[in-house]
Amino acid sequence: MTNIIFCGCFGRMGNVVRQIVKENEDQAIVAGVDICEGTAEFPVYKVITDVKESADVIIDFSSPKALDSILDYAVSKNVPVVLCTTGYSEEQLAQIKKASEKVAILRSANMSLGINTLVKLLKTATEILANNGYDIEIVERHHNQKKDAPSGTALLLADAINKTADGKYDYVYDRSTRREARPKNEIGISAVRGGSIVGDHEVIFAGLDEVIEINHRAYSRSVFAKGAVSAAAFLAGKPAGMYDMSNVIG
């Protein structure tokens, strides 16, 4: 049995994660953490330092503001943590890397198994197309309540492409002030915000007389919840270090 502390248990992902864990006889949420009020089938605390229950892993779907307390708790209790939150600053990313020297941490901008399979496909496409004159653009679409832009997933996809291409690309988020032809070594990343869009990501490889588009569309938040729960099962008991969803899907 994998016992889980769930941070952000009353947030957008709260009910979805709780339902998936409830249907899995090998996992259980033993405590939740959330500043909001709500009801749950497990004890819920305002801050993780108040949690009394023992756990094998932490799932965090809360906020970058909670990072300090979560990392402190994870390191002090030696509890691995799956970080599903996006919008971290460069300083916070450095904190996460430092904490991973003492405890297992899995961080991904997108927990969907489909998105992380897409990352693998993009690496193959980049190896073939990047040196053959194809321009690369990424368009991401999310609901109108999403605060960060571009999405962490769009950056995850861009980074996968850029790493495969030995870092030759610059990221461009706005071309409105430019009056020039598109430079070759750039990836344009566009953000759309509207309605209740769960998450759409489109990667465009535009070449001479042909265009290849690779798309991922999330129809519900359950795809992220399923990935997070799978990641928690994988990470429990792992030694200190940085992990990502590529380790989960193999």
Image (cartoon, grey):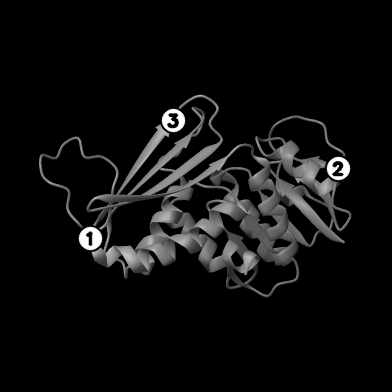
Q: Does residue 110 appear anywhere in the picture?
A: yes
Disc 3 crowd, CA 10 A, few/some/many (<14, 14-19, 20+): some
The quarter of the displayed image where residue 157 is located: bottom left
Circle 3 SS class: strand
User: Which circle's residue, 3 or 2, is located before the other in the chain?
Assistant: 2
- Name the one closer to the observer, 93 or 158: 158
Q: Mark 3 or mark 2, which is nearer to you?
A: 3
Q: Quadrant of the N terminus?
A: bottom right
Q: Which residue is mark 2?
A: 42
Q: Amino acid at mark 1?
A: Gly
Q: Mark 1 or mark 2, which is nearer to you?
A: 1
Residue 88 placed where, x, y %?
48, 50
Q: Amino acid at mark 3?
A: Arg
Tell whether 75 sits left or right of 192: right
**Residue 23, above or below 234:** above
For image coordinates 70% across by 44% down, the residue present is: 47
Q: Does residue 147 appear anywhere in the picture?
A: no
Q: Mark 1 or mark 3, which is nearer to you?
A: 1
User: Which circle's residue, 1 or 3, is located before the other in the chain?
Assistant: 1
Q: Which residue is mark 1?
A: 133
Circle 1 SS class: loop
Cα separation, mark 3 vs mark 2, equals 35 Å
Q: Quadrant of the C terminus?
A: bottom right
User: Which circle's residue, 1 or 2, is located before the other in the chain?
Assistant: 2
